[in-house]
Amino acid sequence: MVHFTDKDNNRRKHYWRLDTKCITLFQSSTGKNYYKDIPLSEVLSVETNIDPLATDATREPHCFEMKTRTNIYYVGQVDNLQNPDPVDRDAGIGTRLGSAWAEAIKCALNPGCVTPQTSSMAGPKSAEKGDEKQNSINEKKPEPKPKQDLSQLYQVFPDEILGSGQFGIVYGGVHRETGKEVAVKIVDKLRFPTKQATQLKNEVSILQDLHHQGVVNLYHFFETPEKIFVVMEKLKGDMLELILSSTKGRLTERCTKFLIFQILIALKHLHSRNIVHCDLKPENVLLSSNCSDCGFPQIKLCDFGFARIIGEKSFRRSVVGTPAYLAPEVLRNRGYNRSIDMWSVGVIIYVSLSGTFPFNEEEEIADQIKNAAFMYPPDPWQEVSKEGIDLINRLLQVDKRYRLSCDKSLGHHWLQEYQTWLDLRSLEAIVGERYLTHESDDERMEAHRLRLEAAGQLNSTRPNNLYQNSVTGTQSPSKGKLATAISYV
């Protein structure tokens, strides 16, 4: 194809190749040397309605215009009707050839998993309320927002399947303007039951008002008569994968404390908003690319399809969640409240430290849950601290009245260890926000540090400047040195 750009008027000819992720411009039809790649995620629009009067009079009009983040490509060359010679198709010119390429690129920008193209975006609830308030003041209806198309904002990669879950398939994608990677959950309403579509909308309605480092970010929601599209933050796996890929098939206590503390902080935020997750399990604890200096990842809770709005003294009865992580009161079809999330945390701690469920596979799981008949066999529990087992026991209480809350769990001595605090502070430095620890703990942890240092159990290097370093831009110590500085025997 021949082309020129808004920054280079020289008409060039390259051999174009189109795949699901980019357009590659080769220098020849057989060689491997290429001129450049144009990622589809950077293509903002393809326009075929060309104004002939806007074309430079010294050259033949082009066939279509392709706008990217940085350039406008004027592609192809229309047939010269005044020239009696036949058109050389290998020369990369001709109206039919240009039109075919324009349509092919449009199809690649809007793959089959995304069609049909027309879709509307649901804005955040806070904005909707603001519009209603303004409407009551001015007594005028706000102008309707123009419909936006998913493919106009995002490039979805149909061959990059991140997973398939309760509601449909999740694809990888990229925001065209910013280049930010996203995950796009797509539900075919014609194939999936109405109940599942309703649960997905429930998830969206909850996530639209949630903004917390421990909860996955929702970017956009689109709906057509045939499909629902949810565009969310793209993460790097889940906690179950982390457990299974560990050397012994289970996590160390240090890593488990680090992850559980984050889960509890996220749950504390949810419960403060009267939101109960109702389906907490390692698969719904996603891992961010942000890691502490010891290599432990930041976590974010996801999959709020079963989540419920339950007040502090309220109860619900509908059966929700995954059986292996369900609290006894749910299995008994009795009223439940936010404490069902705390039971799930207890199971997650057990699974993380042992790599197994706290059940005997030869007996009915539901009966064991109802009776809290859990065992701690020597392998591996003889290697786990008594404090860790104590927290599990306090969470796996059949009577929900005696089950620890988020605050009491966070205050448990198993999680109030100096090393855990240092690991969390390290993550806060990477994230750039203090959301896991609090300034009120600094003095107590400093006293703890001095006691350990006096006992010869701690290197004298002080890590308390980690968060400040990330804010001011001061360079932090290298990972190797920092790991030595903040670890103790």
Image: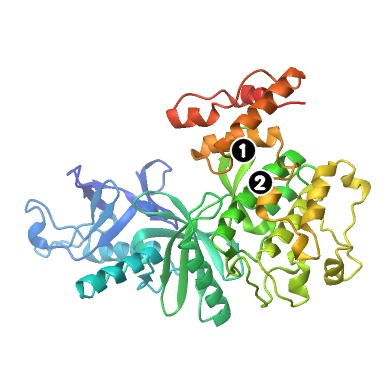
Check contact, mark 1 vs mark 2: CB within 8 A. yes
In the image, residue 56 sits, relative to residue 27, either above or below, namely: below
Q: For this view, does 164 lie left or right of residue 206?
A: right
Other residues around mark 2 within 10 Å, as few (<14) / some (14–19) / many (≥20): many
In the image, residue 353 sits, relative to residue 107, either above or below, namely: above
Secondary structure type for disc 1: helix
Residue at 58% across, 49% down: 236
| Circle 1 residue | 424
Image x and y of residue 475, in percent = 49, 24
| Circle 2 residue | 261
Residue at 53% across, 25% down: 476
Question: What type is the residue that disc 2 sits on?
Answer: Phe
Visual colour scheme: rainbow
Other residues around mark 1 within 10 Å, as few (<14) / some (14–19) / many (≥20): many
Question: What type is the residue that disc 1 sits on?
Answer: Leu
Q: Say which label, 1 or 2, has the lower sequence index.
A: 2
